[in-house]
Amino acid sequence: MPRYHLWTIGCQMNKAESQRIAGVLAAAGCEPVARMDSADLVILNTCVVRQSAEDRVAGTLGLLAGMKKTRAIERIAVTGCFTARDREELQRRFPHVDLFFGSGEYEALSAWLEAIAGPGDQPPRETPLALLEEHGGTPGVSSYVPIIQGCNNFCTYCIVPYTRGREVSLPPEHVEAEVRSLVSRGSREIVLLGQNVDSYGRDLPGRPELADLLERLQPVEGLDRLRFLTNHPKDMSDRLIRAMATQSKVCEHIDLALQSGDNGILHAMARGYRVEDFVRLVGDIRRALPHISITTDIIVGFPGETDEQFEHTFEVLERLRFDAVHIAAYSPRPGTVAARKFSDSVPKEAKRERLHRIEKLQEEVGGEINAAYLSREVEVLVEERKRGKWCGRTRTNKLVFFEAEEDYRSALVHVAISRTSPWALQGEVVYN
């Protein structure tokens, strides 16, 4: 039985696609292994959103070239955003790669596996959902379900529209079928995914919205929690906010990317909203869901960002007090508008200082927000065991650790919080 190692970096969409790739491989009779040097076949599911991610891909491909030369592995396949560029050029740069296939091109992978399989060992031609149901095994307690691919926004710093293409939504009945399949096999939480999940359905007949989909999934028996990401502030509707507030299975957490707190920088980024719009949206969400946790994304050092413009961002973060802030220093991505039009003019030292200032601020804010959970009981969906403790998440997406000898995997438990930090909560099980 061929052994494979599936290497995945990048967003949750990549993780969801790797689950489907695993189903195709299982259908072909392949067995997963934990290490590259134990595999006959290595598949890289790649990301190029940031330069650091692309550097990791190139470095790993260099490592695999040496492993293949010494016959430590036999075949290499590459998928994900890295493969969106000229395939012929990729093949010239990396001649040791046996197959480049695009994101979601599961049939191409299946056909290739069929071509290299021995006589009488042909993988079945099935849909990715059928492959997952029959060969995907038991899914995790929380499972990702992509509902829309691509993005139409073309933010100037972002490579996604060029690697993933324009928005294409999965019909609601297909989403429901996959959710029901995952729940029937053990998932209790579903995370609906899209590069811009708020645009879901605009390309479908009847133009169903994300709010419609959330309502459609409410009756699924065995489904306890629903989440969705990634959100774009300009595309979030009042109806979606009402659905979040009224649909009991939708969790009280949302990730809403600000990116910058300065209107000049937002305009240069082509984000399509002003700071005032974002602040008003956060206010609307918090009025509808007073106990919601909101996380955000920030890019520091965008081309031309002055000290004063950075201070505007810092002041917005101080004012809005997010539960978590995901921070990145700008790096130019070839092919994007920003890389063509703007010089990467902010020195690395300035980017690093701005990043560290926001990290320090968020450590204080996150610590104060999480301290309010002390001595409270919270509902935790247990996902796994880490470093000798069980861990899971609250409906507000707070990471919670607790000690117990019993097997609590996939359980919904109530935990009394006894310790807090800016990053996690700890406590003891009260009941389940």
Image (cartoon, grey):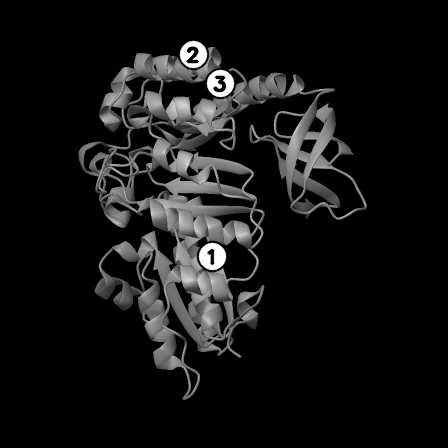
**Whole-percent x, y for residue 368 in the image:** 62, 16
Find residue 55 and name its label.
none
As helix, strand or loop, the secondary structure at mark 3 comes to loop
Measure the alpha-carbon separation of dots 3 and 1: 33 Å
Q: Which residue is mark 3?
A: 289
Mark 1 neighbour class, 10 Å CA radius: few under 14, some 14 to 19, many 20 or more: some
Split into 4 quadrants, where in the image is the C terminus?
A: top right
| Measured Cα–Cα span from mark 2 to mark 1 | 41 Å
Question: Neighbour class for label 3 at 10 Å: few (<14), some, many (≥20)?
Answer: some
Front residue of 19/213: it is 213
Hey, what amino acid is under mark 3?
Leu
Q: Nearer the viewer, mark 2 or mark 1?
A: 1
The amino acid type, in three-letter code, at marker 2 is Glu
Residue assigned mark 2: 315
Q: Is residue 150 above or below residue 27?
A: above
Q: Earlier in the sequence, mark 2 or mark 1?
A: 1
- Asked if residue 46 lies left or right of residue 417, the reply is left
**Circle 1 is placed at which residue position?**
19
Residue occupying image coordinates x 66% and y 18%: 371
| Label 2 CA crowd tier, 10 Å (few <14, some 14–19, many 20+) | some
Q: Position of residue 323 (x, y in %)?
A: 53, 23
